[in-house]
Image (cartoon, rainbow, N blue to C red):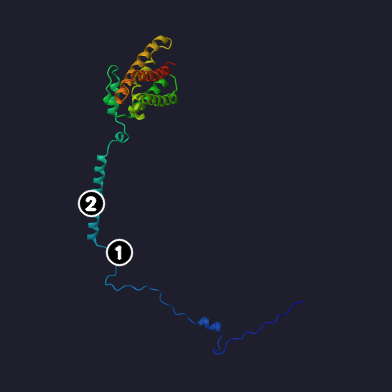
Amino acid sequence: MAKEFTVPPVVFPSGSGVNPSVGNINQRRVPTAPFQPSRPPSSSSALPFMSFDMGSATSSSVSLGGSISSSAAIGSASFEDEEPLLDELGIHPDQIWYKTRSILNPLRVNPTAHKDSDLSGPIFLYLSLCLFQLLAGKIQFGVILGWIVVSSIFLYVVFNMLAGRNGNLDLHTCTSVVGYCMLPVVIFSAASLFIPQGTSVARYAVAGIFVVWATRACTNLMVALADGGEEHRGLISYACFLIYTLFSLLVIF
């Protein structure tokens, strides 16, 4: 059974007597002009940000080029005045060679060359000793480095204990002297590569010569560079002898 719904009647407003929908269709909308921003009063039609002066542009480019050239000149001048990289790192090859050459004479060591202590030369000699040991089939980088540190501290403590209050030897100078006097041991390590392994007597004899050479050089430098060591030269020589004997045994075995 279908249900019936009541629809209320539609009532149009009176007055015109014309259907509204028909009237809206017949009416035409008058087009409105688009929005136009107001322009400032100016005689020129060019935009303000597009106008520029050629003279000012030329002068600005000239000033810019002048500033760049002047800054480049200042940069090149400052680069030429800089010190070499080795000097900034504290590595002086001339001083290293001068100090190393002073150790080459076992009978006469120049102590004035070692007043300015450094660690660049000793590190080079330590690496040379490690390299020759590596060529002999012995990987002893850590052992040599540890023995060097212990030897420098040992000689520093012994010297200052013997000198007492008059001792003025610092650890940096002691490490530098011990390192430069390692040159005979480095030469022995290089020479041991050509000595046959079976001739142990010859190896011990050669090792004794280089140990005495290093001991004499280190003792003379220690006594000359620090105060209070002249009267204890024998004990200082014994301490240096133990140090370089230890390194020579490391080369032999």
Q: Secondary structure at mark 2?
A: helix
**Among all residues in the image, which is located at the extreme bottom?**
15
Residue drawn 25% across the image and 58% down it: 57
Q: Position of residue 223 (x, y in %)?
A: 31, 22
**Where is mark 2, residue-wise?**
66
Pointer 2 local density, CA inside 10 Å: few below 14, some 14–19, many at least 20: few
Which quadrant does the C terminus fall into? Answer: top left
Vertical relation: 244 (above or below) 13: above
Residue 215 figure quarter: top left
Give x and y (percent) for residue 147.
Answer: 42, 24
The residue at which mark 1 appears reads as 50
Quarter of the picture holding the N terminus: bottom right
Q: Are the residues at dot 2 and dot 1 in contact (C-beta closer than 8 Å)?
A: no
Q: Position of residue 5 (x, y in %)?
A: 71, 80
Establish if 86 lies above or below 20: above
Q: Quadrant of residue 100?
A: top left
Foreground of the two, 30 or 188:
188
Please, what secondary structure does the residue beneath circle 1 have?
helix
Q: In terms of sequence position, does the residue under pointer 2 or pointer 1 come before the other?
A: 1
Q: Amino acid at mark 1?
A: Met
Image point (34%, 28%), residue name: 165
Q: Residue furthest front?
A: 165
The one nearer the camera, 99 or 60, is 99
Q: How far is mark 2 from mark 1, CA to CA? A: 27 Å
